[in-house]
Image (tube, rainbow, N blue to C red):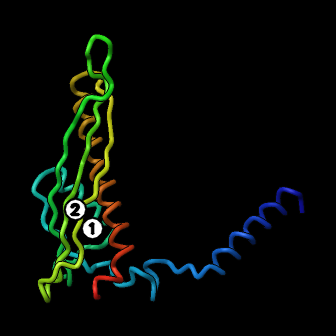
Amino acid sequence: MSWSDRRKFLKFFAVASVISGCGFTPAYAPGGSADGLRGAVSVAEPSDANSYEFVKQLETRLGRNLSAPYRLDYTITTRSEGVGITPRQEITRTQVLGAVEFTVTSVASGDVVQRGNISNFTSYSTEGSTVSTAAVERDANRRLMVSLADLMTTRFIATYADWGA
């Protein structure tokens, strides 16, 4: 066994020992903090391109169930601002800021089990043709919606055990 193989083995053994000794339980595993979350939230229908991307990512992460015990209602807001400005006052980079205000309601009782907001940003270059700038703007908005949906999923995983499920 070479020295590099031994180091890899020892590193793997050390990491495995730490993880198994700390009480780590995968979130979606039986008994995990988000056990039962998948398929438990129905998401309000999208109304535009941004909300479509947001809902698509949420349903990829959480599953799609129109008769789920919880309903997610949301409002997405975005705004753009120039951040890269040349001495001639030409904008070369645009930042897209997005926020989602949301409410998760128990369908059975009508009680709000989670309420809050999340936000993030992304940016894109405006140096290019009109067509290429429009394409990167659409991509930046898509990336922002994916990021916001992932942040929401993370919050749901962390708080699902407190929803009273």
Q: Quadrant of residue 72?
A: bottom left
Compared with 92, 48 (above or below) is below
Neighbourhood count class around disc 1 (C-alpha, 10 Å): few under 14, some 14–19, many 20 upward = some
State the residue at coordinates (71%, 76%): 17
Counting from the top left corner in percent of width and height, residue 84 is at 33, 25
Q: Which residue is mark 2?
A: 55
**Residue flagged by tag 1: what amino acid is it?**
Glu
Q: Quadrant of residue 101?
A: bottom left
| Residue 97 location (% of width, % of height) | 26, 44
- Secondary element at image label 2: helix
Q: Which residue is at a point 50% across and 78% down the rendered structure image?
A: 26
35 left or right of 116 in image:
right
- Image point 28% across, 58% down: which residue? 118
Q: Are marks 1 and 2 in contact (CB under 8 Å)?
A: yes
Circle on res. 59: 1
Image spot of residue 30 (x, y percent): 45, 88
Q: Quadrant of the N terminus?
A: bottom right
Closer to the camera, 92 or 138?
Answer: 92
